[in-house]
Amino acid sequence: MRRLSAFDCLRRGWTNLSANWELVLLQWFAGFLLAALTALGLFLPLLIVGANLLGSGNAARQAEQLARRLADLPPALLLALVAMLAVGLAALLLHCFFQAGAWGILAAADRQALPGPRRRREFFRTFSLRDFLGWGGLYVWRYFGVFLLFGVLAFGLGGVIVLWLLFLAAGGVEWGAPAAFGIGLGGALPVSFLALVLGLWLPLAQADLAREGGSVRAASRRGLAVLGQRLGTVLGLVLLTLLAVLSLALVFFPLGTAADSLLAGAPQMRTLVRFLLFLLQSLPNTLLVMVLAGALVALVRSETPSEIRRNPEVQTA
């Protein structure tokens, strides 16, 4: 059986996305919604706590009111925490909904097209707003579950990093710099590897979630299995995407610098130009991320045994 190479997956992912180009605009719009909700989640606690700290009158009276309100601050802090968690949960659910809709369309399109790297874009055309909303509603809780699992694993990895840093500091105090260097080097390799595996596992699991009969548990296992079998391919696809994003940033950097220099005396116009440049840069960034998603869908489906048995012609180029 001929495996899809990184280039084959990238070509198939590009064809998939070009046939369903509306996904780029939807994900672009979702990014701004998510940013707005995140900003609101940060602003509400400050507003609630600030409203309980602000006073009125002269400085002496404000200081007296501030001291008195500090005693009543815990309920305000609790309310601020609840507001932040509520908005954060809403942002996460919104993100999961859009992810489920986008990955669902990409997976359905890849399933609809004939196997192999070279297929015409007409074979991949499956987008409709109704289908996008349908996939989002159907798989939103799967994606919520996998992001929740990712958060738990990331929290555990953070605990491991903290313990490693504590051992590093204790070793330096107890045994000196050579011991600290050895502990740092010995811990940096496994910690970096775990972080790499966790970061690459998440998109692979998302690619498998948008599958009939899939689940968070099955997608987690499939993501690890594909990562173990095709680590080089996955790493190559991600590095190519990062390189393209960095290249795009290098293109827009002189434009932003020129805008700051030419509009130094007009701060409002400079802010507007900066915002427009950000909009222009974020759209191709979203395109690159979605091409990577399409490539990972092609890779995961080509490595799934059930898909291979169902489509034996995947051996053809």
Image (spheres, grey):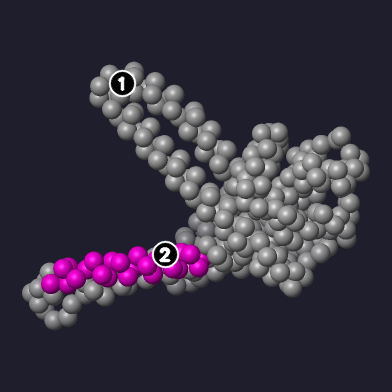
* Quadrant in the rendering for residue 230: top right
Residue 124: give x, y in percent of width and height: 84, 58
Q: Amino acid at mark 2?
A: Leu
Q: Which mark is residue 18?
A: none
* Quadrant in the rendering for residue 71: bottom left
Magenta region, mostly helix, strand or loop? helix
- Find the residue positioned furthest to the bottom: 57
Number of disc labels: 2
313 left or right of 43 in image: right
Give me the residue at 28% from left, 66% from top: 77
Q: Is label 1 in a helix, a strand or a loop?
A: helix
Any magenta on residue 86? Answer: yes
Q: Which mark is residue 85?
A: 2
Residue 61: give x, y in percent of width and height: 9, 77
Give me the residue at 82% from left, 36% from top: 3
> Sequence-wise, which precedes: disc 2 or disc 1?
2
The C terminus sits in image quarter: top right
61 left or right of 8 in image: left
Residue holding disc 1 = 177
Residue segment shown in magenta: 68-91
Q: Nearer the viewer, mark 2 or mark 1?
A: 2
Residue 176: give x, y in percent of width and height: 28, 20
Any magenta on residue 79? Answer: yes
Residue 152: give x, y in percent of width and height: 48, 48
217 left or right of 4 in image: left
- Find the residue positioned furthest to the left: 60
How many other residues sit within 10 Å of disc 1, few (<14), some (14-19) or many (≥20)? some
Q: Amino acid at mark 1?
A: Ala
